[in-house]
Image (cartoon, grey):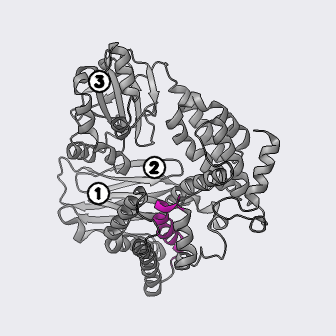
Amino acid sequence: MKPKLFLTLAVAVLLGACGNTITAQKMEYASSQMVELPQKGQFVLKGRIENVNPENPGKISLAVCDVWENELHDILIQSDGTFTKVIPIREIQDVYLYIGDTFTLTVCDDDTISLTMDKNRWEETLDISGHTLERDRELKLSVELYWKLNAREQALNNAIRKTSRDLKLSVTDSTLMRQLVEYVNDYARIVEEWEHTYGLLPHKDAFLVRAFFGQLYFLARNDEALTSLQYGWKLQNAVKSIAADKPLIQTLRPQWLIHNTYRKFIASYCEGVQTQAVISFNGNVSSNNGSFILRAKVGELVIPDKTIREYALVDHLEMQIRMLGYDNILPYVSYLDSTVTTPWIKEQLQAIKQENTTWAEGKQAPEFDFIDENGKHYTLTDFKGRFVYLDIWGVGCGPCYREFENISALHEKYKTHEGRIAYVYLCGSYSNKEAWLRTAKRYGLAGYNLALPENYKGAYDIGVFPTYILIDPDGNVIEYNTSRPSELLKEDNNILDRILKTENGTDN
């Protein structure tokens, strides 16, 4: 980009060209220092489950919501129903506990968490307790919030998601926005009343951040809705620690990146802010190296906190690679390599580069050794002579499940090529066998339902769900992060159409 043009853009943005009305006056404060991640500590989950089958007692599964990807852990239950496991965790993180349903717990370093229940009556008997009075009341608050608000939260999420996708509806619809405000207010009220009744909550902020940003995530790209909430109904007043008479972008706190809901919001919100700034100046924004670099440079002007800005850029890189392919955005990757300086974010950038080098187009795909429900092993060689459409998914992954709903239609679209395509569904953990097979049955996954062996470490332990990989009949990579089933159904002349046509020498 020419220096003169960028200088003009800088002035335009600083004078308020962007849709978020950022002005020179509002940019007067200095960016924060780089924030480091807390070092890994640990917590212990132990307990007893009544009425397990001694011959097949099963396991408990949980996922620690780490900064770049969730870390799944399986805890084996002994024949007498007892279990215990030490699990790595940072200072404070959300944990998804899969017991009959998904509970979100706020877990801290050095926690010892006890869980008891009757397997046949888990909803009536579930009890989760901590090793101190403060942690006990916070863990019980997590369970209380689930019982009181989970169904309502899911309904609200679905309503906001549907409205956001329908351009004919206004996302600032008063009914929906009031429901959002009421939900956050009720969440905050339950937290406040719990503390008033039972005593101090040392990590109250963690609960309030989850309430506030967990809902705003679905509106993160809609400046009109965010402004309506912030300045209309004063949503931030529901969370006193967040309240500020400043634009939302000036209230961003890098230390909250430890919280899962905050990270999701930040990634979407910052990308939207940068894009809107470029559109306000140029009138449009395209998807190419120049556009990505321009947005990154604009980010230096409109996103004041360096850690927040760099996190959002690197987090969004995976999506950009998915859209254009790694080789096609190498200049942008090089730009990030030269500008990102926060150590833990730089480390992730290097991991992305290494991963995509492994999966370069035309390169021999790494050999694999996956297993089915009966323990039978499958290698890449077993699929030689067929295109492999590899769907890597995880238990509890909502986007994975939504794509599963397109599987039947995908098979129908390519039924004339049935013998030439191997549909391989790879679950990220064989040890979570019950949930894996239950999900596969629920969605009718036709093809090869396989899983990574327990304790597997290798190229296919990707951890970002869902990930789709297309491999040719000779075992070479056609495309890493290839089109999802929904995209294959929607796009004309998609990548699968093209390779089948080329292979045939005729049209599909």
**Toward the viewer: 165 or 59?**
165
Q: Which residues are magenta?
A: 201-222
Please name the residue that numbered disc 2 is placed on. Answer: 70
Nearer-N-terminus badge (2/3): 2
Disc 1 crowd, CA 10 A, few/some/many (<14, 14-19, 20+)? some
- Residue wearing tag 1: 82
Q: Nearer the viewer, mark 1 or mark 2?
A: 2
Q: CA distance from mark 1 to mark 3?
A: 45 Å
299 up-or-down from 142: above or below: above
Query: In the image, residue 78 lies at what x, y percent?
Result: 27, 51
Q: Is residue 209 magenta?
A: yes
Residue 447 versus residue 435: which sits nearer the camera? 447
Magenta stretch containing residue 63, yes or no? no
Q: Secondary structure at mark 2?
A: strand
Q: Residue at x 44, y 65 (%)?
A: 170
Q: Left or right of 503: which side holds 58?
A: left
The circle drawn on residue 421 is 3
Q: Mark 1 or 3, which is nearer the eye?
A: 3
Quarter of the image with the N terminus is: top right
Q: Are marks 1 and 2 in contact (CB under 8 Å)?
A: no
